[in-house]
Image: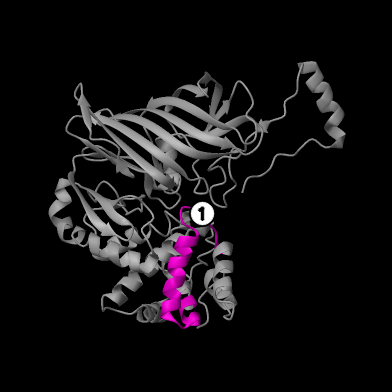
Amino acid sequence: MRTPHPRTGPALTVVAALTAACAGGGVSGAPGDDGLRDPYFPRAGNGGYDVTHYALTLAYTPTDRHLTGTATVTARATEDLSALNLDLSGLDVDSVAVDRRPARWNRAGQELTIRPRDELDAGAVFRVTVRYGGTPETITDPDGSEEGWLPTADGALGLGQPTGSMAWFPGNHHPSDKASYDISVTVPRGLRAVSNGQLTREPTTRGGRTTYAWRTAEPMASHVATVAIGRYDIQRYDITARDGRLPVHTAVDPAQADASRAVLRRLPDVMAWAERNFGPYPFASTGVIVERPEDIGYALETQNRPVFPGAPDLTLLVHELAHQWYGDSVTPRTWRDMWLSEGFATYAEWLWREDQGGETAEQTFDALYESGPEDTSDADGDGLWAFPPADPPDAARISGRPVYDRAAMALHRVRQILGDDTAFRALLRDWASAQRHGTADTEEFTAWVERRAPGSDFSGVWRDWLYGDGKPPR
């Protein structure tokens, strides 16, 4: 995705040499790109480096909505760099250092441009430390939903899909660059701070403030990182998973505790079912965060513990836990590939109903096909056949209905062509295994399916169901 910088050609050689001689030396590096040219968010992410780890030290006071933070970003240069960018929206930058040496920096919109004292050679591992603070922003997405830093009745919630994480920490905010995380959050005594991964130690209180430290060892895209601050009913227990004991950590707003209890009791059942269908769970812990519906308008597959707007129903729990395999472990490489996340999680709902003795996936497919409008829109202009799921028309519709339902129907067409339920479920497991902790795009998936079933013709599925306009032929 990175747009390479032009290299010195023959016509520029003399000029470059004279410039270097006058300067008393040569500049071999170039500034890293200030965006990865994503089809819908071209300024998201940055070129010239890959992040391997984020260490975030945060402190938040809900009464004045003030956040202070120190972000240490460990990365590897993928080219010779004279400067690099991080995405950061709002907030005030106090200082920047590269490998503990103060660095020059400037701000322009969401771009924090950093100029190290010494150039970074391709292959070099370096650390950028940014100290910052202020009142974090709530960002309105192109589809009108809110993300970023959301104040809640008793705290705050950090959500990042697609670009909101840049409202609370600087980083390479694009799904193609995943990293491990350490997130430490200090809040007033009596509040809790819940994040991804596992607690690295028991919370400590000093001076009326409590610190929670979380670690996510497996690679994570920044848009599924989260911090939830508030008063929660906490449950911690272990369940049996295929790879051994799996810690569960749930955080439920007390106002939602009674309504959530029955569904959350089913979490071990859902996890066991998901492992049978999708393979070993890809992370070291699981759980949920349940907020009040007035504080958040949607569920999100934040890694290890998805966030819900009020007590979830069982189908929504299945959907968001399935995302841990499809969306979090196997991450869409660009926002155009969103169907590889939402289509798979939607199809997981179909499989769950089928396996629980309810409507079969075939019946769900038939009902959708027959009830779908022949035109291309519904009241919201986002009907089942409004656009192809692998090519949404704009950023406002990367989470539109075709990316969920029509994408799931495309997967069912793959199942129909295979003609063997065992083979199809093996395909789901093997895709999750082959791409575990990585990223993937549509072309990679379609080629992988064709290699898995060389005697089958899927060209019509890709042409009509993933990329075709209007209602596909049966």
Residue 406 in view:
no
Above or below residue 220? Residue 272 is below
Q: Is residue 360 left or right of residue 423?
A: left
Taking the spot 38% from the left edge, 58% from the top edge, the residue there is 323
Query: Where are the magenta residues, as a range?
Result: 414-442
| Quadrant of residue 80 within the rendered picture | top right
Residue 114 in view:
yes
Taking the spot 37% from the left edge, 33% from the top edge, the residue there is 136
Helix, strand or loop at label 1? It is: strand
Per the image, is 420 magenta? yes
Residue sitting at the far front: 244
Per the image, is 51 magenta? no
Q: Position of residue 392 (x, y in %)?
A: 52, 61
Q: Is residue 101 left or right of residue 203?
A: right
| Quadrant of residue 27 within the rendered picture | top right
Above or below residue 371? Residue 57 is above
Above or below residue 419? Residue 129 is above
Taking the spot 32% from the left edge, 61% from the top edge, the residue there is 242
Q: Position of residue 75 (x, y in %)?
A: 53, 35
User: How is this picture coloured?
Assistant: one colour
Q: Position of residue 318 (x, y in %)?
A: 30, 63
Looking at numbered disc 1 in the image, what kind of residue is underneath it? Answer: Thr
Residue sitting at the far left: 258
Q: Is residue 141 left or right of residue 75?
A: left
Foreground of the two, 254 or 437: 437
* Residue under numbered circle 1: 439
Look at the magenta stretch and give its main secondary structure.
Answer: helix
Dot 1: within a 10 Å radius of its alpha carbon, few (fewer than 14), some, or many (20 or more) residues? many
Taking the spot 43% from the left edge, 42% from the top edge, the residue there is 180
Q: Position of residue 279 (x, y in %)?
A: 39, 64
Foreground of the two, 241 or 277: 241
